[in-house]
Every structure is written in C-alpha cells, then in structure tokens.
Image (cartoon, grey):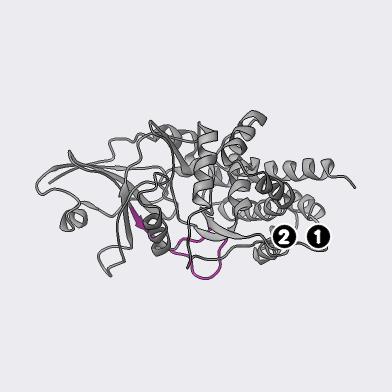
Amino acid sequence: MGMVPDPGSDRDDLRDRHPQLRHSRPMTFNPVPLLASHGLLPERAWVEVMPLWGGFWNDVMRVRSEERDLVVKHYGARSEGWSLFPIVPEVEARAMALLQGRSIAPEFEAFWPAVAGEHGPVLVYCFAQGSPGATDLKRLGQLLRQVHTIPADGFRQTPVNAREILADADRLDDPSDGNKIWMALQALRPPLPDDEPDAARVFLHGDFGSGNVVSGPDGPCIIDWQCPALGDAAEDLWSFLSPAFQAVYGEKAWTTEQVEAFHAGYDDDAARRRLAFIGPFFTWRYVKYALRRSEDLAADDPAAAGLYRAAAEAGLDDLERSQASTPS
C-alpha cells in the first residue's frame, strides 16, 4: 500500500493567504494502517495522503484511494476544564454522527479513542468537495436554520442570557494593563438589562464562521464540529456575521447585501431581533478573548497573533458603532 506525503491540497490557497492555518508542528501520524485495519481502505491499494489546512492542535489529512476520499483528524490535544472553544474529540464525533445523512456536514465514518503508544483519538469522515469559504449565504442561512431544529442532548450548555455571556468573559484572563484596545473595551462593556428572559436552547455549531464552511457543487457544507453546544441560536448567527470573526480568518466584513441574504435564508424575524439585542454581549466577550490570544501567541506565532489583534480591533469598531446607534 503506497503513500504519497504532502503533494499539495485543494485548500492550499487558504493556507497561503492565512499563514496561521499552516501546520505548526510536524505530522507524525500515518493513518493508512489504521484505516486499512478497519476496512476503510482497500488492501494493497494506491493511497495518497495530503495534509489539509488547520492543525494548531491536530493533524488533519485527506486520505484518498481509487475507492475512498476521506478526512482523518488525529487529535494532539484536548481541553481540560472550561474553555470558550473546547477541544473534546468524543464530542465532535458525536456531533458528526448526529448530523449524518442530513446534507449539512461531511458524512461521519468512524471514531477511535486514543491507544497509548500508538495514536491519539482519531475521527474519520468523508471529504467535502469544494472551496473553503461561504459563497451562497442564503442557502447557508437555510442550512443553519436546519441545524438549530435538530433534537439534541448531552452537549455542553452555553449562555442563554446577557449575564451569562459576560460571566464567561470574566472567566477569561485579562489582557495586559497597557493594552489600549483592552482599555477601550472596558469602557464599552454593555450594561445588563433589568429583566431578560432566557433564550431557548438549540443545537449549535459553536464556532460558526466562514472558515468552517466549504462551498461545493451541491451547496455549502459546514465543517469542524469541534465545539458543539446547546445554547442561544443567536450565538451561531452572531459568530458568522461578526466582523471580528471574519477578521480572524483574514477576511473583510460581510456587505449589507450579504448579511440580508443570510437573514433571508435563516428566515426568523424573532431570531434577528434577538441577535440585535444580544450581539454586543457576544462581541464584548470575543474581543477580550481575541486580545488574550493575541498576547499569548505574540512570541511563537506572530502571524496568528496579528490576526487575533485584527479581530479585536474589528470587534471594538463594531461595539462602537452599536453603541452609537443605540438610543440613549
């Protein structure tokens, strides 16, 4: 069984534009024997293995033979305790199994827990043909609405009111005292409402941005289900439309026309009103997170640190616009 390492990737253009998405450590896991032993690759067949974009903490590979076209994620880390964007391999596998057959995410194939001395946790799913990023925003809005109607339980619970969102923000380490964006952010902390009912909990992607979408011949496909949750639908709406989330991928903010197309696809006026109210709280939390990440990565990965700082700046601008447009 032959293996051709790293001949390139269908997503190299994204890696070239965003150096923070390149693999930051050498890939040491060969997935071919494991896949073959479980019958996911034919015996004595030609096999091509190509690293894909991603890989801050995990190796992500496309494994292709004449019969199969798979993605293998080999986890190199997992979150311990609370995290805003947790890495829990078993949870991603469970989310993808839940989505199987719905034409929303790549088709789930297998998950194997870590085996000491051999490999970490391994997730396998079908490769999604297409280009990275979102193009048909109306269809993507429809797809997200489908996600939010899927019955689910047993996933982590995320905030469903403004108080809980700011409590999450307060759990994050503060940026350094001399950070000018942090100083400005503290002055823009949104005030809590006197009385706010909790939003209904729905199944969330939990990290829904344009970088987690593949646009293919059959429409968009949502990838990277590493942070699923049960929470406020507005959180997924906010993250996708947020200028800060766009900036962390090195992309421009969506135009008014694109935002309207996405809302037309999602087609829920109540959710849109909810987003208008709760969005600044999500933005405030994320700007603090991005500032902290920017400082933490400054020495080892200045390119990624720069993108997180750009995200913080975009989020701060968004907060300033929001407060300027809010009646006093």
Q: Is residue 81 magenta?
A: yes
Choose between 108 and 119: the one closer to the eye: 108
Q: Is residue 154 magenta?
A: no
The correct choice, above or below, for 322 with respect to 259 in the image is below
Question: Can you give x and y, in whole percent of width and height, for residue 277 in the image?
Answer: 74, 50
Instruction: Provide the secondary structure element on which disc 2 rests.
Output: helix
Choose between 216 and 20: the one closer to the eye: 216
Mark 1 crowd level (few <14, some 14–19, many ≥20, 10 Å Cα): few
Provide the residue span drawn in magenta: 73-87
Q: Give the left or right position of residue 80, taking residue 40 as reference.
A: right
The majority secondary structure of the magenta stretch comes to loop
Q: Amino acid at mark 2?
A: Ala
Mark 1–mark 2 contact, CB under 8 Å? yes
Q: Is residue 284 visible?
A: yes
Mark 1 lies on residue: 193
Q: Residue at x 81, y 60 (%)?
A: 193
Q: Earlier in the sequence, mark 1 or mark 2?
A: 2
Question: Can you give x and y, in whole percent of width and height, for residue 78 in the image?
Answer: 44, 64
Q: Amino acid at mark 1?
A: Pro
Q: Is residue 253 visible?
A: no
The correct choice, above or below, for 212 with respect to 193 in the image is above
Instruction: Provide the secondary structure element on which disc 1 rests.
Output: loop
Question: Can you give x and y, in whole percent of width and height, for residue 148 in the image?
Answer: 53, 52
Mark 2 lies on residue: 162
Q: Residue at x 79, y 55 (%)?
A: 190
> Residue 34 sits in which quadrant?
bottom left
